[in-house]
Amino acid sequence: MSIFETGLGPSAVNHVALSPLSFIERTASVYGDYPSVIYGPIRRNWRQTYERCRRLASALVRHGIGKGDTVAVMLPNIPEMLEVHFGVPMIGAVLNTLNVRLDAQAIAFMLEHGEAKVLITDREFHAVIRKALGSLAQPPLVIDVNDPAYSDGEAVSPLDYEAFLADGDPRFAWQWPADEWQAISLNYTSGTTGDPKGVIYHHRGAYLNALGNQMTWAMGHHPVYLWTLPMFHCNGWCYPWTVTALAGTHVFLRRIDPQRILALINEHRVSHLCGAPVVFNGLVNLPEANRITLDHPVDAMLAGAAPPAKVIDAVERMGIKVTHVYGLTEVYGPVTVCAWHTQWDEQPLEERARIKSRQGVRYPTLEGLMVADPQTLEPVPFDGTCVGEIFMRGNTVMKGYLKNPRATDEAFDGGWFHTGDLAVRHPDGYVEIKDRLKDIIISGGENISTIEIEDVLYRHPAVLEAAVVARPDEKWGETPCAFVTLKADYQAIGEADIILFCREHLAGFKLPRTVVFVELPKTSTGKIQKYLLRDWAKAL
């Protein structure tokens, strides 16, 4: 009998659903006394953190929350954000981490669209949360997080997070997901339009991408990880689960402060951190008197627009080794890496920086990566010249978009995930992005829809026509640049007037940083020629 005809199938003995929940159970049992959390004066070990996660799960159940229910959180990088990444899925609920930079209208949409039953929110965001909740017909149960490190906020709810945990059982018997395809989290992205799309992650993908982070970065046992990356973004690129699996230490930073980053790295011997180029620009632009040369190895993972060579050089002179990665919300964060070859160390700075700017090759946990014709899906030659769209497939691709089958079908057309990013593939197989198919602006690591900004601009009574493109920015990577044609009777309107109007309708990071008044270039059919506007923006 052939080995393939034995009739043996999966059973409880040899098949268990993959889930990152297994990481914290193992770490707490094996390394319970090892440090898990450092935040200001707070110090916890893995046994204590595991108990707090179980208390959260238990308390949620006591309030009627269960499998498939959405628990939204509006939190900065504080220990509670780690706890929700385990406590919420422990009961089969779905974690929805909200972007703390968004306005009330966007937050309200997400709470309603995601059908949030619970909202756990930090006092810093009381104003936007109150406004968002006020527009909902059925607001969720709100739990207030009072961070002693932040004293300027106000409670939105009398239900306190610590009191909520106290009502939970530290020995709560949480349930392993019966199906690894079960949703674990919901992340909203602007995508290529102004309407947010809800990206659904599953336990299997979260588990695998968390392991992919370790395999790609070789983090080793017990890393000390500094949270400079927003944890709301793609579930912190799955690092809440990765660092936990490695029995590492989570060092929390409520808001980005270059001086504080250096101090924490030095004080706690931080080994790893992630972020957008703006984080590292802040470090290298500190006054000379405030800079220090680190005396221990530090690895930094960077995603987004690659920084200039001088920034890479300055960062590495500080003792921080840079690794460039690429990904999207739809694929759990980074899934490609500019995997380094030792012979490249001998190259001059400019050449090393050029190589590091490439998006690279797939993670070991991503099964397929290609650059191909967007229509035919025919792969482009590996010549570093022919441009195509980046496509992906594998276990770390999202389940799909919540309540949006049309967008899901479009994204998965042809059996590949369409990223919308245009790139070339070099002879060595490394991918390098050249443009964005749908004009998305990536500023400080955040996606900004040009369509959303244009919609606001057209609401201004003085605006006849408007178009928005990305303008290169040394600090943020890119910022929105608006090209506006004014109506004849409003020629006195200036840049400040336009930006002030946008401020009333958009989150701060989405505001145009530059406004140019001009007659918009168009094709013979009346379509605005954005490729010309991009060239103009670069020349400003």
Image (tube, helix red, strand yellow):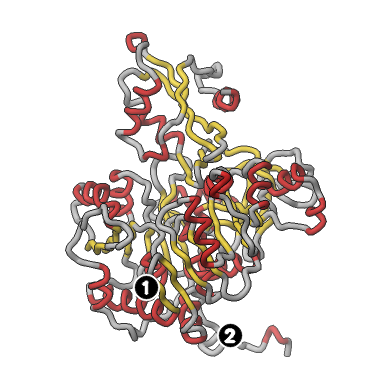
Residue 279, percent from left and from top: 52, 49
Q: Residues within 10 Å of mark 1 (few under 14, many from 20)?
A: many
Q: Relative to 31, does residue 431 appear above or below in the rendering?
A: above
Question: In the picture, residue 139 is in which quadrant?
Answer: bottom left
Residue at image position (55%, 65%) is 270
Measure the C-alpha gap from mark 2 to mark 1. 32 Å
- Label whose residue precedes the other's in the sequence (2 or 1): 2
Residue at image position (62%, 61%) is 298
Secondary element under disc 2, as helix, strand or loop, is loop
- Left or right, 216 with respect to 466, comes to right
Q: Nearer the viewer, residue 95 or 248?
A: 248
Identify the amino acid type marked 1.
Gly
Closer to us: mark 2 or mark 1? 1
Q: Quadrant of the N terminus?
A: bottom right
Residue at image position (62%, 43%) is 307
- Left or right, 347 with respect to 199, comes to right
Residue 457, percent from left and from top: 37, 27
Q: Nearer the viewer, residue 388 or 250?
A: 250
Q: Which residue is mark 1?
A: 87
Q: Nearer the viewer, residue 324 or 376?
A: 324
Q: Which residue is mark 2?
A: 9
- Left or right, 486 with respect to 389, comes to left
Q: Relative to 486, does residue 133 appear above or below in the rendering?
A: below
